[in-house]
Amino acid sequence: MQHKYVKSIFLGYVILILIGAILLYLPICHIGELAFIDALFTSASATCVTGLIVTSTSENFTFLGEFIILTLIQIGGIGYMSLVIIFFLFIRQSLNIDKKRAMKQSLDLPTLHVRSFLKKILLFVLFIELVGAIILTIQFLKKFEFLDALWFGIFHSISAFNNAGFSLFTDSLMSYQSDTISLLTIGFLVILGGLGYFVLIEIYENRKFSKRFSIHTRIMLYGTIILIVSGMVLFLSIEWNNSKTFGNLSFYEKILNAFFLSINFRTSGFNSIDIGALKDSSLFFSTLFMMIGGGQGSTAGGMKITTVAILIITVIYILKDSNQEPSIFKRTIEQKVINKALAIIIFSSFLVLCITLILVETQNLPFVKILFEVVSAFGTVGVSTGNGDILSFSQQFDTFGKSLIIILMIAGRLGVFAFGIILLGKAKTKHFKYPKGRIII
């Protein structure tokens, strides 16, 4: 049954990407020449809330084109199935069990109470994006006219909360690296989007701390803080004296931009410094953060914080040769959850390594930069070492290379487990068991 819903969601994303590409390819949506593969790449990047660009969003698209990109970001962030459900609710039709299950699969909902959960999600999304848009508009008014500042504020707020990383500034946010309010606003929008809808709703409903948070929420909150802080420490230690990144910044600006960089390296594609100027050691270690990603049921991609946390805990228990089952916060972790986490991590690593190997052999470009781009696409992060100008490194790929990146972005947005089901198909039900074999490891 699950296989049917995964296939419908996958086809939905593919159709949405194709529609977006066709619209962006129309002459009224872009300026100058635009290859269809680039329109398809842009549509996929927006729908999968990635942020990799092979053509300048502000320079090569009209206002209509930018609006289409923003619409794709919003749909991709919430999930296209959400809009289907909204439509049925709007025309006051009841939802059958198939639609509820498809929605549950699309957003990783904990229950089939779709209607109430969706309303809460929409209210949270609209409120957070509205607050972000107001703050950013006020900041952008210092440099732009009101209408431009308003559009930039709305665009960047939606792009940030949905962890898309698309920017209407050619240098992303490098010209705002000293603007505390702008960087912190976008940074916290990215964090909120990456935590996941379950966590946001639970925090709101338990805002008076009258009861304990769920295991999932606690793992997400602790994991997010640990990853942000460890990322800051890592980048500051490596890039502190690098004149092309942090070297010429004041102490406060180094802390601020390290914080912003650590946030965006996991889930979003904004940058306040030149990513291409980072040392290879920073680029390599950042791939680990991008692979981890954000939370389940969030606008972020990657293997997910909870997945990695479960496997780390399990490894610790095994290495300690404990006679207890793995547990966290005094709760036992089920074996089927451990198995799923292991499958996700192994499949993710295998997929990234295979695509990296293929691109290294076919594109004749530096290994580290290709690895960085592949992981960024898979994690739907969107940061890139660049093409030497304002575009992503993917711009240097041929049609075949860009197609592989598109597949990776879809895999990252759909989810590793769901994408694995698409590739491998559904297992046949067996009504027997083989005898246990003795294997030495």
Image: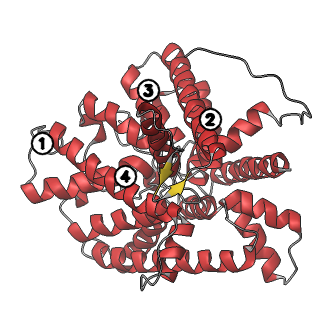
Q: Earlier in the sequence, mark 3 or mark 4?
A: 4
Residue of label 3: 370
84 displayed left or right of 287: right
Q: Amino acid at mark 1?
A: Trp
Mark 2 crowd level (few <14, some 14–19, many ≥20, 10 Å Cα): some
Q: Earlier in the sequence, mark 4 or mark 2?
A: 4
Q: Secondary structure at mark 2?
A: helix
Amino acid at dot 4? Asn
Rendered position, 61 above or below 89: above
Asked if 168 appears above or below 286 in the picture, the reply is below
**CB within 8 Å, label 3 to label 4:** no
- The residue tagged 1 is 240
Give the residue at the far front of this rendering.
323
Q: Position of residue 254 (x, y in %)?
A: 15, 53
Depth-wise, is mark 4 or mark 2 nearer the camera? 2
Q: Which residue is mark 2?
A: 343
Q: Of 417 and 439, which appears nearest the observer?
A: 439
Q: Earlier in the sequence, mark 1 or mark 4?
A: 1
- Real-space Cα separation, disc 3 to disc 2, in angstroms: 24 Å
**Residue mark closest to the camera, 3 vs 2:** 2
Could you say whether the residue bearing mark 4 is in a helix, strand or loop? helix
Report x, y in % for residue 405.
57, 34
Helix, strand or loop for disc 3: helix
Compared across the picture, whether 324 is left or right of 320 comes to right
The 10 Å Cα crowd at callout 3, few under 14, some 14 to 19, many 20 or more, is many
Instruction: Kindly identify the residue that appears in the image at 58 percent across and 64 percent down.
Output: 74
* Residue type of the residue flagged with mark 3: Ile
Q: CA distance from mark 2 to mark 1?
A: 38 Å
Q: Nearer the viewer, mark 3 or mark 1?
A: 1
Of residue 221 and residue 10, the one placed in the foreground of this image is 221
